[in-house]
Image (cartoon, coloured by chain):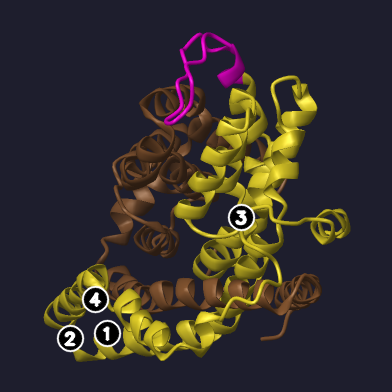
């Protein structure tokens, strides 16, 4: 963590945002707060809610009222225990997103980066916060800036299976800390292995919005 | 409730907050905005999915799952878990709800690791919504070919590890 923070303190304009610029924060904008309702209760939310109602109805009909209440009580307890962790993970993700120097990361995983590049890409995937929108966006930035194909694959695989925010938000609450730790250890070699495989595969790689790249 | 995990998370968040504030209050506010937006999206869906998972867990035929994904199923559990993860075109809320249901029904740790790995690497919605639009079909082809053996590899590593240590059956933390 220390090295990451040292890197971050030296970052400037990594993502086109002007740090410290006199931008009026959306936090003071009532319209933005209202728009959160749309984000939170958008179409897919109602899908999830309908899913829960259907499952609850089925549970009541098949197993009776006692089983229904029992499941509901267990779930509410679980949710209450999870929420502090989810809130913290989200805060961490947001702050990491604004402070991480993306240009410097790209410089470390370029075409001549070798095994070290795969290791760095794996590490970057682990600490990349946020959902697929931020990880794939970052990957596209890295690819466009000349990241090596093995490092790109290692990065996205690492984010998908080892991403620390995903582990804290999903693995730990749903599966427990012991399982999460074992899964992390077991999966640790995979970004590296898949990155090495990607370097050997003879496919053409043509990234969206970039010039054609041939072979390796 | 306050354990090491939460403590580390808290300290890391505080350290990052200091770093962001040193770069300017605008940077800090941007990070907070992002966190709140993600939370607004995530939390309502997560609550629904957890409640649904609780009901489904009650309804699930646990002996059937235990038979196909339990520790007695050995290698074939790894293959079944790979296939289960492969065909699940859903986000993490549903995937982890299902994993938790499998765990409660007696699925083995290697099978659960395989399932989560397989889902995380192949989830179709992510490929179609993000990977192809942002990186292009040729990258998706390269990546899928590169990760094809990864879930089975994860399962095998976990099986091998299981010969030396005993895994506790996972439970929600």
- From the top left corner, tell me how far across and down residue A215 is, in percent: 53, 8
Which is more N-terminal, label 1 or label 3? 3
Which residue bears the numbered disc 1? A67
Query: How far apart are the alpha carbons under marks 3 and 1?
Result: 54 Å
Q: Which of pointers 2 and 3 indicates the residue nearer the eye?
A: 3
Left or right of residue B61: residue A8: right
Check disc 3: other Cα within 10 Å, few if <14, some if 14-19, many if 20+. Answer: few
Q: Which mark is residue A52?
A: 4
Q: Is residue A208 magenta?
A: yes
Q: Chain A is drawn in which colour?
A: yellow
Query: How far apart are the alpha carbons under marks 4 and 1?
Result: 15 Å
Query: How far apart are the alpha carbons under marks 2 and 1?
Result: 6 Å
Q: Which quadrant holds residue A85?
A: bottom right
Q: Give the vertical position of B3 relative to B137 (above or below).
A: below
Query: How far apart are the alpha carbons under marks 2 and 4?
Result: 16 Å
Chain ID for label 4?
A
Check disc 4: other Cα within 10 Å, few if <14, some if 14-19, many if 20+. Answer: many
Which is more N-terminal, label 4 or label 2? 4
- From the top left corner, tell me how far across and down residue A161 is, in percent: 56, 46
Q: Which of pointers 2 and 4 indicates the residue nearer the eye?
A: 4
Per the picture, the main secondary structure of the magenta-coloured stretch is: loop
Chain letter, brown = B
Which residue bears the numbered disc 3? A16
């Amino acid at each position: 963590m220390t090295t990451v923070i040292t890197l971050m303190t030296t970052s400037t304009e990594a993502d086109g945002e002007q740090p410290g610029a006199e931008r009026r924060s959306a936090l003071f904008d009532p319209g933005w707060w209202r728009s959160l309702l749309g984000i939170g209760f958008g179409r897919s939310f109602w899908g999830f809610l309908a899913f829960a109602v259907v499952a609850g109805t089925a549970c009541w009909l098949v197993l009776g009222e006692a089983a229904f209440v029992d499941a509901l009580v267990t779930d509410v307890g679980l949710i209450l225990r999870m929420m502090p962790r989810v809130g913290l993970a989200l805060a961490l993700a947001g702050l990491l997103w604004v402070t991480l120097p993306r240009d410097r990361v790209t410089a470390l995983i370029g075409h001549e980066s070798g095994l070290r590049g795969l290791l760095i890409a794996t590490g970057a995937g682990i600490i990349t916060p946020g959902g697929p929108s931020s990880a794939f966006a970052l990957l596209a930035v890295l690819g466009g800036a000349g990241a090596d194909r093995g490092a790109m694959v290692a990065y996205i695989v690492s984010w998908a299976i080892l991403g620390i925010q995903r582990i804290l938000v999903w693995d730990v609450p749903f599966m427990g800390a012991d399982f999460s730790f074992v899964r992390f250890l077991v999966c640790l070699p995979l970004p590296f292995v898949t990155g090495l495989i990607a370097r050997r595969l003879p496919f053409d790689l043509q990234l969206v919005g970039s010039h054609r790249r041939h072979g390796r | 409730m306050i354990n090491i995990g939460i403590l580390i998370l808290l300290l890391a968040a505080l350290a990052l907050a200091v770093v962001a504030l040193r770069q300017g209050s605008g940077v800090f506010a941007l990070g907070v905005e992002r966190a709140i937006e993600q939370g607004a999206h995530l939390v309502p869906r997560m609550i629904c999915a957890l409640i649904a998972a609780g009901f489904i867990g009650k309804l699930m035929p646990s002996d059937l799952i235990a038979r196909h994904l339990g520790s007695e199923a050995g290698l074939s559990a790894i293959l079944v878990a790979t296939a289960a993860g492969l065909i699940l075109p859903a986000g993490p809320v549903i995937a982890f709800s299902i994993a938790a249901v499998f765990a409660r029904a007696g699925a083995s740790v290697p099978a659960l690791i395989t399932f989560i790995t397989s889902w995380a690497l192949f989830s179709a919605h992510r490929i179609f919504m993000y990977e192809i639009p942002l990186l292009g079909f040729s990258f998706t082809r390269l990546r899928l070919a590169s990760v094809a053996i990864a879930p089975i590899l994860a399962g095998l590593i976990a099986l091998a590890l299981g010969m030396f240590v005993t895994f506790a059956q996972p439970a929600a933390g």
